[in-house]
Image: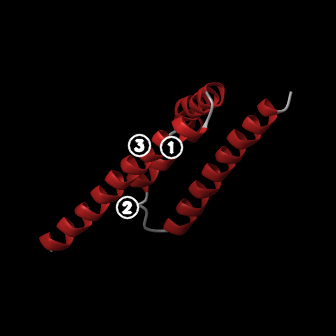
Amino acid sequence: MSESRSVKVLILSSGQALTALVSVISMAVLTRVFSKPDYATFRQTLLTYTFAAPFVMLGMNRALYFFLPSERERPRTWLVENLLLLALAGAVLVIHRIAATFP
């Protein structure tokens, strides 16, 4: 039992390490490819997203960790409702970003 947990922890940790590595490499490539104004616009977009995403999601992605294990009657309904709300929030964020792009 402990070996399976250790393997799962290592897999999750390697995923986070790989994500960090990809972000560092992509930033290095983008600094070479983009001009200064384009790179600044890209960084502002990322800053806006990292600031706005938690407000848009309203903690719904973390709520599953709390509510889903204790739900006995309709766990799939909880999951589907949560995913639909997250998809709707993401769509609102995308629509807002597209609307801000075209004045």
Regarding residue 74, the answer to whether it shows in the image is no
Residue at x 14% of width, y 72% of height: 3
Sequence order check, earlier mark of 3 and 1: 3
Q: Quadrant of residue 39?
A: top right
- Residue 55, image x, y percentages: 56, 33
Q: Residue at x 71, y 43 (%)?
A: 94
Q: Secondary structure at mark 3?
A: helix
Question: Dot 1, crowdedness within 10 Å: few (<14), some or many (≥20)?
Answer: few
What residue do we see at 68% from left, 39% from top?
93
Residue displayed at 48% across by 68% down: 73
How far across and how far down the image is residue 86, in percent? 60, 50
Q: Amino acid at mark 2?
A: Pro
The residue identified by callout 1 is 29
- Of residue 88 and residue 81, the one placed in the foreground of this image is 88
Residue linked to disc 3: 24
In space, the residues marked 3 and 1 are separated at their CA atoms by 9 Å
Q: Residue furthest left?
A: 2
Of 48 and 53, the residue lying toward us: 48
Question: Considering only order in the chain, which callout, 3 or 2, is on the residue closer to the N terminus?
Answer: 3
Q: Nearer the viewer, residue 58 or 8?
A: 8
Residue 41 figure quarter? top right
